[in-house]
Amino acid sequence: MKYQILFTPFKVGQVTIKNRFCMAPMGNSIGFGAKGEFSQNGVDYYVERAKGGVGLIFTGALITDMQVDPFSPVEGLSPLYSPMNFRRTAIALNERVHSYGTKIFPQITMGLGRNYPGLYAPSELPVFFDPNQKSPALTKDEIKKKIDAMVQAAALMKASDFDGVEVHAMHWGYLLDQFALAITNHRTDEYGGSLENRLRAAKEIVEGIKQVCGSSFPVTMRLGLKSYIKGLFHASLTGEDEAGRTLEEGVEICKLLESYGYDALNVDAGMYDSFYYAAPPMYQPKGFTLELAKAAKKAVHIPILAGGSRIDDPDMCAKAIEEGKADAIVIGRALLADSQLPKKIESGQIEDIRPCIGCNACMNRAFTTGDALCAVNPTVLREGVYGLNKTVESKKIVVVGGGLAGMEAARVAKMRGHDISLYEKSDKLGGNLVPGAKHSFKADMQRLIEWYQHELKKLQVPVHLNTGLDADAIKKMNPDVVFLAVGSTPVMLGFKGNDDPRVISCIDALLGKKKVGQRVVIVGGGQVGCEMAYEYAKEGKTVTLVEALDAVLSTGPAVPIMNKMMLNDLLDFHKVKVYTGYTLSSVDKNGVVIKSTKDTPESIEIAADSVIISVGFKPVPTMAKDLYGSGFEVYEMGDGSKVGNVMSAVGDAYEIARSV
Ligand SMILES: Cc1cc2nc3c(=O)[nH]c(=O)nc-3n(C[C@H](O)[C@H](O)[C@H](O)COP(=O)(O)O)c2cc1C
Ligand code: SF4
């Protein structure tokens, strides 16, 4: 087998893990019931990944503290709130997970600290999500209470048949990280000052757990090996001028944690303040944490479990193990996108793996609604209730449009046993994903298109390319159901000079239909415009970005904070000139004239070889009204119904096709 090394066992303490794949902790709130127990959704979520072949599951963080700051903005109540309820559901979860030979460690947290308002921190600190607020400093007595809660929770975990426990977390700037980092720990007692003092809470936690649960009960630590910050609230794009944890200090911490009794380290990087290192978007290179892990691996004897950088490539995983960079690979979002990833690698079905596209919509959901849904996999955290059933009555379904929504609807309906034909007026499948995938950093978007092509082929869905359908043609086919997934087109602006040959739409520019010159003005600072600005500036072009609103990335579907932070820093780094509060006035032989949106009549002239219009998309005119009353069901979906994003297109299509 090509990836044999990934399917060899290893040990965490005395516990044997069957292969080298760990599921990263990914917290949510719908995985819990009203008393802090696992909900059926929570159980199904983990069982599905055990079934998918992962060797070790880390659950999302469970809060422990019931006294000092029991409030958690994301997860449910502490398991200690109703231990019997928790234990009952945990045992049921563990029995099912263990049936697949998978081990499971719950992740227990000491707290989230200054990342959120209203929570305690080691010192008084500005809150990440609301810098006007300050997190109060913990007293020594409160620290002891929090450590005690961690130990009590670990004892409950052991009594609930978990295989070990993970301590959350000296990473992402959470409470234990705030203790460990000099920049956030200004204490003068034994919990502040020297590195050993700053790690004292982590030491007391593992010692307490080992005392109560026995030395053979494995304890791991989630640890960020490097912070990537220039200061609080300021990420360091290049990793230089580190104001948080340097890799050297990260390695020192590994050695100390090993000496305290931790059995393995689950390593990654970044803080909320450098969020694009913590939850890397598609602009980050995959696997960048493996080099950090290598340094940790050299320094300690306990296993290093490495993740946190969108690792999903089996070659990369196998190489990391072979080269001794890590003992196991910790996979997060790629296991949301495809719960069966390890099994598919094991059976050589690499093409069947649905790729994570690094959009971070899951993180956005986790922060806003707590349900961590995935843009490309609508079943996440609803595995037991939102799957597919075979239809009792096979219907003849015509799908109009081969973009994302059309492909997903065709895939789902065909899997359910319907008779599907898909019609696409262009010569390829993918719709607006095709230009969207052109950027150098959008390889996974291209993989997603290829995955759909592969799935439709496997399912033998007849795909008719270069075939536009009008209402009459559809009526002649006499279908039972029509899915209209006709997509969207770029909005073009009316302005003086809009017929100038230098003016092009973002789609034509991305598809290379017209050459983009050296001096580029991009009108529209949404995600599409910003990504183009970054790409062209990276290529060495002189790029100006013009946005009518007061900030870029402030319109259209919400751009997750990590992606937004990184794009802004990339635009800055690559010296893109950004004008906010300006609109395009005219294009003439001298270049582009932009006008302030404020009351002042100020206008600026910018020399340009190309002017790219990227001010949004509008639905392609629908033919739904021409089809109503024809005796068949008509559903509109995707951008053709309402311009959205990958999550809304796939979500709409899945919802409709699973129930028709
Ligand atoms: C929805 C979501 C929830 C997360 N919750 C946790 C958590 O509870 N504890 C934790 O240590 N990391 C958490 N993470 C971070 C992941 O464990 C992982 O480090 C991150 O997704 C980057 O790894 P990846 O690139 O493989 O996805 C979460 C990530 C996501 C996407
Ligand atoms: S929502 Fe986006 S980033 Fe998150 S798992 Fe799904 S595809 Fe990946």
Image (cartoon, rainbow, N blue to C red):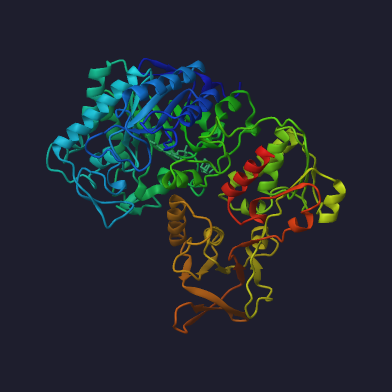
Residue 178 at x, y percent in the picture: 26, 42
Residue at the extreme right of the image, as rendered: 476
Residue at 57% in and 39% down: 378
Judge whether 607 appears above or below 362 on screen: below
Residue 25 at x, y percent in the picture: 42, 33
Q: Nearer the viewer, residue 260 or 406?
A: 406
Residue at the extreme bottom of the image, as rendered: 601
Q: Nearer the viewer, residue 297 or 17?
A: 17
Residue at 64% in and 54% down: 639
Quadrant hosting ligand 1: top left
From the viewer's perspective, is 649 left or right of 57? Answer: right
Residue at the extreme left of the image, as rendered: 189
Q: How many marks?
A: 0
From the viewer's perspective, is 482 left or right of 345? Answer: right
Q: Nearer the viewer, residue 653 or 298?
A: 653
Query: Which quadrant of the figure contains the C terminus?
Result: top right
Query: Which quadrant of the figure contains the N terminus?
Result: top right
From the viewer's perspective, is 419 left or right of 525? Answer: right
Judge whether 356 appears above or below 232 on screen: above
Asked if residue 454 shows in the view, the reply is no
On the image, which quarter does residue 176 sit in? top left
Residue 400 at x, y percent in the picture: 75, 50
Residue at 60% in and 32% down: 387
Judge whether 520 appears above or below 234 on screen: below
Residue 92 at x, y percent in the picture: 44, 20
Asked if residue 491 shows in the view, the reply is yes
Judge whether 365 appears above or below 143 on screen: below
